[in-house]
Image: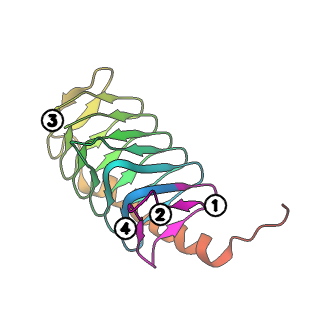
Amino acid sequence: MPVYALGDQVPVIHPDAYIAPGAVIIGSVEIGAESSVWPGAVLRGDDGRIVVGARTSIQDGAVLHTTPFTPTTVGDECVVGHLAHLEGCTIHAQALVGSGSVVLHNAVVQTNALVGAGAVVPNAMVVPSGAMALGIPAKIRPDCVAPHMILLGMQSYVDRARRYRDGLRQLTD
């Protein structure tokens, strides 16, 4: 797993976090306890900070970047799906960002909100707690997300990270 400092920008990774082989972490990136970053994910904190809370999964192929003006923050107990792109946005605790979705500058996904697979959340949009953001550009469907929908997925990745930490072994070069 390549983890790189960029000048004086040094990643801070909690010892209980799982970083999969093939994930890339560069610069001003902080990853919390029991979080996981999966193969092909790139967290590039070159222009500003990226913060990933505790018990959050950043799944395969996801890209997290930032701007010089706006950090990228993902709260505790979140799920960021495969191939998602987050840049200069805030994802509150216990939110889900679906596979292949994009969340852009100054957008906010509140607690217990869900960004559907393939959706594009444009600059400065707020996805309210309990709502889904669906489509391109995203449209809000209020009051349709139950917290257990997100927490089950979150827990499955916390458990999966433990399994990988304990049992993954490379067989060939």
Q: Which residues are magenta?
A: 1-24
Camera-side mark, 2 or 3: 2
Kindly identify which numbered label has been placed on residue 142.
3
Q: Residue 72 in the image: x percent, y percent?
A: 29, 48
Is 12 covered by the magenta stretch? Answer: yes
Disc nearer the start of the sequence (3/1): 1
Disc nearer the start of the sequence (2/3): 2
Tags 3 and 1 in contact by the CB under 8 Å rule? no
Report the residue marked by disc 4: 55
Q: Secondary structure at mark 1?
A: loop
How far separated are the C-alphas under marks 4 and 3? 26 Å
Q: Amino acid at mark 2?
A: Ser
In this image, 134 relative to 60: left or right?
Answer: left
Report the residue marked by disc 1: 21
Image quarter of the C terminus: bottom right
Report the residue marked by disc 2: 36
How far separated are the C-alphas under marks 4 and 2? 7 Å
Query: Residue 131: which quarter of the image?
Result: top left
In this image, 86 relative to 166: left or right?
Answer: left
Disc nearer the start of the sequence (4/2): 2
Q: Secondary structure at mark 2?
A: strand
Tags 4 and 3 in contact by the CB under 8 Å rule? no
